[in-house]
Image (cartoon, rainbow, N blue to C red):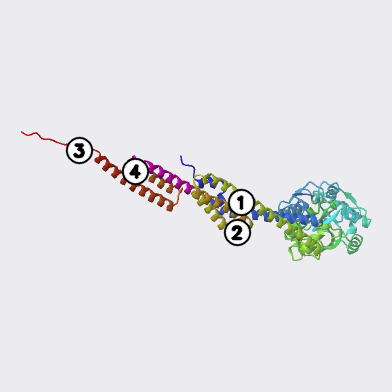
Amino acid sequence: MRPISFSVRFSKFVPSLYQNSRYIVTQKRVAVAVIKKLSFRCILSLVALNLSSCAWQLPRTVTISSGSDGSGYQRISQQISLSAQSMGDLTVEDAENSQGSLQNLERLLNKEVDFAIVQLDVVSEAMKEGKVKTVVILTQEYLHLVTRKDSGIKTFADLKGKRVAVGAPGSGIYFTANRIFGATDLDIVEINSNNNNIAKLGKGEIDAFVYVGPLGTNERVRKTLKQTNNLQFIPVESHLTNYLTIQYPESYRSAIIPQGTYKPFPELPQQDLPTISTPGALITRPDVNSSKVSLLTWAIISNIRQFSAFYPEFASEKGKVLVNKGLTHVHPAAQSVFTQGDPRNAWLRYIQENKPLQAASIMLLVTSTIGFSLRWWRQRRYKTLLINNRQAISELRGLLETEPQKASEEIERLRQQYRLMLIDGTVPTEAYEQIERMTQIFADECRTGLEKQQQNSIKLVLESFRKWQESCVKNPQDILENLYQDQQKYLEMLLAKQITMPTYLQLTQLTLSWGTLCISASQNLSLRQLEQVPPQITTTSSK
């Protein structure tokens, strides 16, 4: 049985060299991609270690407390959630079912949520005490004093002794109403109600009610006001506005509810109505993860036009300015976003600042990491090439004893593959030089083996000729048959590349020469045999 072709066996060990050199090119591309990815991760890791002010990990979920179903706060929370989706995996979960600002503040301080939507007047004391920090302004919440047209109530002072619904305890409306009526020392009959106040007003159960909210944000309130014709708004006099804005500058601003805001005809309000407003803002605790604050802040700012339904001025070019206009006690992470933009690019901005020593150390660490990764990859490829080459040579040694010519051809083919790989740049120069030394040593062994095989073949033939010479005289005909068989054997040895063509021609010439001698000897033997036969005398009888 003939042995398995070396090409098949060799391909098991070095397919990248013998079958398809593109395999190594692919490996190189994959390795470069891995190194790039590793280097990028190293950059982020190094920045995180060296820039503590910029170091953060992407949070997956933040929690927020907003308001009841259908309320303006809940709609704002839904828009925040949509905006957060632009930040990738950032998800906003709403605690829901809140009575309003006071309950939202309570949830925040109890660490039930990360953020809360509140009226700033509700949290002014908590801000001064450092318990909460502001993030962004989301809306302006206007004070509405609503009564019937036929109630006889025309001014704020006319509310004295009247039944006024001031909201439910725990709501921002309740807080604002108590602060305003407390500032005026105006005695009213306080009704704790936050629902169906317009219906109660129509039935005469109350004389007026207080509502604090963005213009048109609460669809339920807006729809009810539009369907009712016997309503009017009470203006807030300038002296009350001045008092509140001076005493609580972080909480209140002078404001106007434009004519026809809630109903175009008949107009509601009937004319531009002076009142006060308090910002509706997103707040958080100082201990909340800075990355959560910065990412959510940027999510809102980068989508600020989507919040124009709650604050119409956000649709203008000044929208990004209004989110923090007049805002105090701002969380540092939010303030950083206001001044520097997208927090995900903080490490790039850091390098661009006037901090050459830190930037140089970062670049040194990054380049060192990349260099180490490249050296590691080259050493790994270098070792792999050497191992594959040793395995190939080990496999070829099995052919060296029996088929040195074939082993020589295979090692030369392998060397050619390495030369092409060196030209293509897929083999490092230092690796090629060592592989070339290894293959050259084996190639020399192949030549030595080939020469030894040829010498052995010639010695064998000469020995055969010597034996033939001794027996040629005795039995030349048998020698001729042996010479013919040997000539066929030489041809097989040539085809099997065990001998070279010049050696085959020399052996063939010797065989022909011995054949000629054997024929001559055979003829001489025949003549001698004839001479030794005694002559036969034939006699004839006479008749």
Name the kind of residue labelled 4 in the image: Leu
Q: Earlier in the sequence, mark 3 or mark 4?
A: 4
- Mark 2 or mark 1, which is nearer the start of the sequence? 1
Check residue 425 in the rendering and tell me which mark sits there, or answer none.
2
| Residue projecting furthest to the left | 543
Q: Does residue 410 belong to the magenta stretch?
A: no
How far apart marks 3 and 2 lie (CA) works out to: 91 Å
Front disc: 4 or 2: 4
Helix or strand or loop: what does disc 3 sit on?
A: loop
Which residue occupies the foreground of this view, 417 or 217?
A: 417
Q: CA distance from mark 1 to mark 2?
A: 14 Å
3 and 4 marks in contact (CB < 8 Å): no
- The label on residue 535 is 3
Q: Nearer the viewer, residue 462 or 427?
A: 462
Task: Name the amino acid type tagged 2.
Answer: Gly
Amino acid of disc 3: Pro
Q: Position of residue 521 (x, y in %)?
A: 32, 45
Residue 121 in the image: state x and y as whole percent.
Answer: 87, 56
> Which residue has dot 1 on it?
385
Magenta span dominant secondary structure: helix
Mark 3 burial class by Cα count in 10 Å: few <14, some 14-19, many 20+: few
